[in-house]
């Protein structure tokens, strides 16, 4: 697929930016969001109807995050602050991921991919773990309200998705949804790393975030290819 070549090009651009220019690196990561959104839309169109709302909502959330990242990249390139605008956009993206990420295992349970009641246990463990880990993070470094929300959501989604990775059933639907879930694990971990990196984030956390996030987009695209007819 052409989109696969585009993502490969973005990896090369990111590597070049890592060695030379932070604007180029940031641009590559920003554009990779739209590749991920495309992959989610592609999967959504080929999924059972009961899964489409959650997967489509995740794609919309990805678009918001991509737009926020583009505003950040504009800030890096020009020095003009875009924080006020991008914070609202990021919060919209986070809200979509929070709601639709929670809806996804519920929809998968209704589809018969999980045992009855399994999604409720997932959410309960993720909520308790997310609150606990976000609280512990404040002991490592102080967080304002927005950062605390980001941290709590990132921990919650990481725990929610990582619990699902060993459980999915086989078959075409199970295989590609497992790819989606692994991508969401990587993406959530990327956000956790970014939060733990400080404000402004340390260089190690920026590079780790970039790698994890672009790996997540790569896994999403690979999962989308599993939906193609043989």
Image (tube, rainbow, N blue to C red):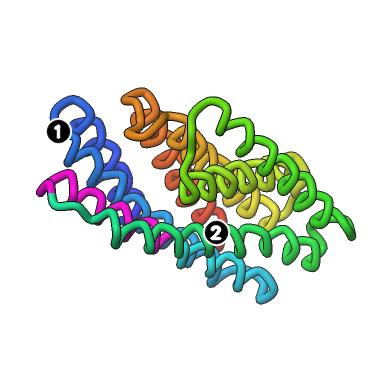
Closer to the chain start, of discs 2 and 1, is 1
Q: Position of residue 202 (x, y in %)?
A: 34, 26
Secondary structure beneath disc 2? Answer: helix
Q: Position of residue 37 (x, y in %)?
A: 42, 60
Q: What label does residue 21 carry, if any?
A: 1
Task: Say which residue appears at 25% left-offset and 42% top-offset.
Answer: 26
Give the quadrant of the N terminus.
bottom left
Secondary structure beneath disc 1? Answer: loop
**Relative depth, front residue between 180 and 137:** 137
User: Predominant secondary structure in magenta?
Assistant: helix
The question of residue 117 being in magenta is answered with no
**Relative depth, front residue between 88 and 216:** 88
Q: Position of residue 104 (x, y in %)?
A: 67, 61
Q: Which residues are magenta?
A: 62-79
Task: Say which residue appears at 48% left-offset and 39% top-offset.
Answer: 143
What residue is shown with label 2? 97
In the picture, measured across the screen, residue 122 lies left or right of residue 178, that is: right
Give the quadrant of the C terminus.
bottom right
Q: What whole-number distance in Å separates the C-alpha atoms at marks 2 and 1? A: 30 Å
Task: Say which residue appears at 31% left-offset and 56% top-offset.
Answer: 2
The question of residue 76 being in magenta is answered with yes
Judge whether 212 appears above or below 99 on screen: above
**Relative depth, front residue between 181 and 132:** 132
Task: Say which residue appears at 82% left-offset and 56% top-offset.
Answer: 120
Q: Mark 1 Cα within 10 Å, few/some/many (few <14, many 20+)?
A: few
């Amino acid at each position: 697929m052409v989109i696969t070549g585009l993502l490969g090009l973005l990896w090369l651009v990111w590597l070049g930016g890592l060695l030379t220019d932070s604007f180029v690196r940031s641009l590559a990561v920003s554009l990779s969001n739209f590749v991920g959104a495309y992959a989610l839309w592609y999967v959504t169109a080929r999924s059972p109807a009961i899964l489409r709302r959650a997967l489509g909502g995740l794609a919309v959330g990805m678009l918001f995050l991509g737009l926020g990242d583009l505003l950040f990249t504009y800030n890096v390139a020009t020095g003009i602050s875009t924080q006020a605008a991008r914070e609202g956009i990021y919060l919209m993206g986070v809200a979509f991921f929070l709601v639709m990420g929670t809806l996804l295992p519920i929809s998968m349970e209704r589809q018969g991919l999980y045992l009855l009641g399994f999604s409720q246990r997932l959410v309960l463990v993720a909520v308790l773990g997310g609150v606990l880990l976000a609280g512990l993070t404040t002991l490592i470094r102080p967080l304002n309200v927005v950062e605390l929300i980001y941290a709590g959501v990132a921990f919650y989604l990481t725990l929610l998705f990582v619990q699902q990775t060993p459980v999915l059933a086989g078959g075409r639907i199970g295989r590609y949804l497992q790819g989606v879930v692994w991508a969401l694990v990587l993406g959530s971990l990327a956000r956790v790393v970014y939060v733990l990196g400080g404000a402004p984030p340390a260089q190690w956390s920026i590079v780790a975030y970039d790698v994890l996030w672009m790996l997540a987009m790569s896994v999403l695209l690979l999962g989308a290819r599993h939906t193609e007819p043989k």
